[in-house]
Image: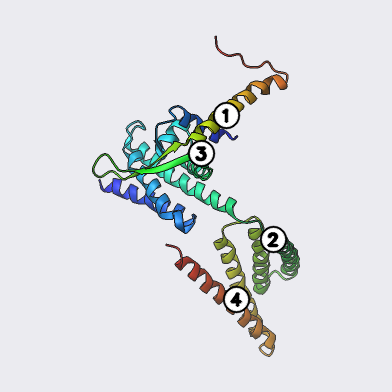
Amino acid sequence: MTGPLERVLGAFLADPEAPRYGYDLMRAARLPSGTLYPLLARLEQRRLVASAWETPRQEGERPRKYYRLTGEGIRVARLELAQAFARRQRGPARAGLPARESPR
Amino acid sequence: MRAERGLLRAGEYLLGRACRQLPHDIREERYREWAAELPAILHDRQIGSEPRRAVRMLGYAADTLRGAALVRVRARRPLPHMMIVALCLLLVTGLAVVAWDIRAVAGAPGDPLDYLRLAWGALLVAYPVSMLIRTVSRVSTLIVSGAALVGVAVNLWDVTRVPADWANYFQAALLFLLFLGLWIVSRRARAGQP
């Protein structure tokens, strides 16, 4: 799993039920739009993310497209993030370095 | 207010360019989605001063264009094996032509025709390179059109030197037709884009 994907999934999992729009995800994942939108399109193609248009709350606002993890998306995201975390924990130990200790 | 409208239009222009890189069926939806964020970024007080917000908004639009272009390049089908062989042969031929022309220029530096031939050879090298590194098709078309025009110029120059040699007229006409064909095809391709 790539770093940007990990950050996007992490941002979604912060509140899995909450619908998120592109700019909101850009800020949460600290990713530029040119990286985020192709990632979202790929996640949507794999049906891990669903999108819907929401009508603007205020007059003059443009309608926004909101993204939300699907049930399968939540499951895969949790699994992928857990695996990535485990890989990071194993990484330093394999290289002969002490594994990072969890804060007490 | 006018400045804000101008900034929004600049952002929308960049997003429009980005959408041109996408398949027809998703262009409009993507444009609506991306363009909806422009005023949101421009009015985001968390970013700070107005100039910073403007820069951030234009950066957003420019980066969206970069992302769309990258997706388009990645989505292209790989070149067929025979095409790669043909391009490599063309590249070797082009390099040989360039080496020959450099030799000619070094031998008689005062002859402008040799410089024109050298430019032609350089374009012959540039075309297979542009195809092999998968630049946007418009660049490759531009290189071939340029090569055809320079080829016409070289042959017309030869005509003025040896007016009796009909091969030069024939080659010039052939290259001009190639240029004309490419120009028409690229015009039609551009007209097909919204």
Residue B178: numbered disc: 4
Q: CA distance from mark 1 to mark 2?
A: 39 Å
Depth check, mark 1 against mark 2: the one in front is 1
Q: CA distance from mark 2 to mark 3?
A: 33 Å
Earlier along the polypeptide chain: callout 3 or callout 1? 3
Earlier along the polypeptide chain: callout 4 or callout 2? 2
- Residue under label 2: B80
Within 10 Å of disc 3 (Cα), the crowding (few <14, some 14-19, many 20+) is some
- Label 1 marks a residue whose chain is A
Depth check, mark 1 against mark 4: the one in front is 1
Mark 1 element type:
helix
Depth check, mark 3 against mark 4: the one in front is 3
Taking the spot 37% from the left edge, 51% from the top edge, the residue there is: B12
Mark 2 element type:
loop
**Image height of B57 relative to B146, above or below:** above
Is there CB contact under 8 Å for labels 3 and 4? no
Residue A65 picture location, percent across and down:
38, 43
**Image height of B104 relative to A70, above or below:** below
